[in-house]
Image: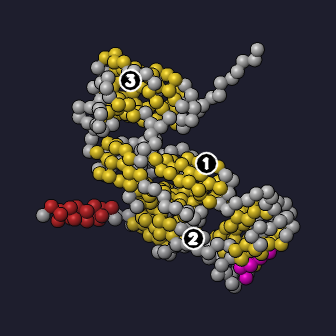
């Protein structure tokens, strides 16, 4: 009987949610091809579209088009207002985008002045416009093949556009590469939480839950990847990377922007987080980290509400005054990565205490959420501490 009631409630919610419907055409879109999205069942005054692939969120009409640059599953969201000033309603749909052939380039490593042949796939008899990315005249061909020579060494982005069908393909060509070179590869990728662990516990409804990916790579190319929560796409992004470097990515980040999204904490239980990399190909399996959502904080545990000062600089040692409920001298402080307690905690009152901490010079700038807990208890609190960028001390001249 209990399962029967759950099914009825789910169907009712679906019918209510279905007043607005998000349609996609074609139903199986491909990379490089124009895809049309239509919001039907309502007459909106304003519609904002988020295609879930890391591209900017843009206002549009009831019908809009988009070209996906890489394959994968994307959550497309349309947020509409029935009238100006009215609350927004969001309708979403999972869309699978299939891969497509890329532009073929020959030779693969050309030099300045060398004639290069570009070939777009499956375009025979179709008029294509070519932009070679070097401010030269746009070329046109009906065979899908065209030649071009670059006057100077450099990296150029080539685009081929089918005006009639809306197809748009692009490729990167490196002209006159000198010195040592290497293919674009990721040699190391590890996932973690802010404190460096691979498991953590949060309270239902908590905000600011962010996972991090530390990676090392070689070569130069574009990283295309997608964060997954329980196997479902969360955020997708595309990021150009330069030769031989290290990088840390955040799960809610649309590089190089801020961190606007927290991982979902509305459903109690254990959840998995991983990163699916579309480009470049990986020679290893990406690890999975997990978080557990509890129904609520420890009813008898400490709760941290605020800290003073609430702004510190990386590389500094400061004494924080803690304010909250049921604070205890043996409580655990959850400060996150690169912050450490360097002295004993002193109680001032049952609701306030002071503790010295050190902020490592490598601490990431931004806002931290600090929490407290009893031993083996659930962390609780929402004290905010802003980390300012590290400032190298100046040495006075004699």
Q: Is residue 93 above or below residue 243?
A: below
Q: Is residue 87 left or right of residue 360?
A: left
Q: Residues within 10 Å of mark 2 (few under 14, many from 20)?
A: many
Q: Secondary structure at mark 1?
A: strand
Q: Secondary structure at mark 3?
A: strand
Q: Quadrant of the N terminus?
A: bottom left
The residue tagged 1 is 246
Q: Give the residue displayed 42% in from the left and 25% down from the top.
A: 307
Q: Quadrant of residue 161?
A: bottom right
- Disc 3/disc 2 C-alpha distance (Å): 52 Å
Q: Is residue 195 above or below residue 56?
A: above
Q: Is residue 5 above or below residue 306?
A: below
Q: What colour-coding does the image apply?
A: secondary structure
- In front here: 340 or 131? 340
Sequence-first tag of 3 and 1: 1
Percent position of residue 293, x then y: 32, 47
- Disc 3/disc 1 C-alpha distance (Å): 35 Å
The residue tagged 2 is 31
Q: Is residue 240 left or right of residue 266?
A: right
The residue tagged 3 is 322
Which stretch appears magenta?
A: 143-147
Identify the residue at the far bottom of this view: 125
């Amino acid at each position: 009987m209990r399962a029967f009631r759950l099914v009825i409630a789910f169907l009712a919610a679906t019918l209510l949610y279905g007043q607005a419907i998000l349609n996609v055409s074609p139903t199986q879109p491909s990379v490089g091809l124009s895809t049309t999205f239509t919001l039907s069942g309502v007459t909106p005054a304003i519609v904002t579209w988020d295609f879930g692939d890391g591209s900017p969120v843009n206002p549009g009409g009831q019908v809009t088009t988009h070209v996906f640059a890489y394959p994968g599953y994307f959550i497309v969201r349309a947020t509409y207002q029935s009238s100006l000033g009215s609350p927004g309603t969001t309708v979403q749909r999972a869309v699978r985008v299939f891969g497509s052939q890329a532009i073929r380039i020959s030779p693969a490593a050309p030099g300045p002045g060398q004639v290069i042949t570009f070939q777009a796939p499956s375009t025979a008899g179709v008029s294509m416009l070519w932009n070679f990315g070097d401010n030269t005249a746009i070329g046109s061909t009906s065979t899908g093949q065209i030649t071009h020579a670059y006057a100077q060494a450099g990296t150029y982005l080539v685009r081929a556009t089918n005006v009639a069908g809306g197809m748009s393909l692009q490729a990167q060509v490196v002209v006159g590469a000198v010195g040592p070179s290497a293919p674009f590869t990721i040699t190391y990728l590890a996932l973690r939480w802010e404190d460096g662990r691979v498991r953590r516990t949060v309270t239902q409804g908590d905000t600011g839950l962010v996972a991090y990916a530390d990676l090392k790579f070689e070569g130069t190319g574009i990283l295309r990847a997608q964060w997954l929560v329980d196997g479902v796409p969360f955020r997708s992004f595309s990021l150009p990377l330069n030769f031989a470097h290290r990088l840390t990515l955040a799960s809610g980040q649309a590089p190089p922007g801020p961190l606007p999204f927290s991982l979902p904490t509305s459903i109690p239980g254990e959840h998995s987080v991983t990163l699916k990399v579309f480009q470049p190909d990986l020679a290893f399996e990406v690890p999975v980290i997990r978080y557990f959502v509890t129904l609520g904080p420890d009813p008898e545990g400490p709760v941290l509400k605020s800290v003073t000062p609430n702004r510190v600089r990386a590389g500094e040692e400061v004494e924080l005054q803690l304010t909250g409920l049921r604070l205890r001298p043996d409580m655990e402080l959850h400060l996150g990565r690169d912050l450490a307690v360097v002295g004993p905690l002193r109680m001032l009152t049952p609701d306030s205490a002071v503790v010295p901490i050190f902020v490592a010079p490598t601490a990431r700038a931004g806002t931290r959420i600090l929490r407290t807990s009893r031993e083996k208890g659930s962390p609780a609190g929402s004290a905010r501490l802003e980390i300012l960028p590290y400032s190298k001390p100046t040495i006075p001249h004699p």
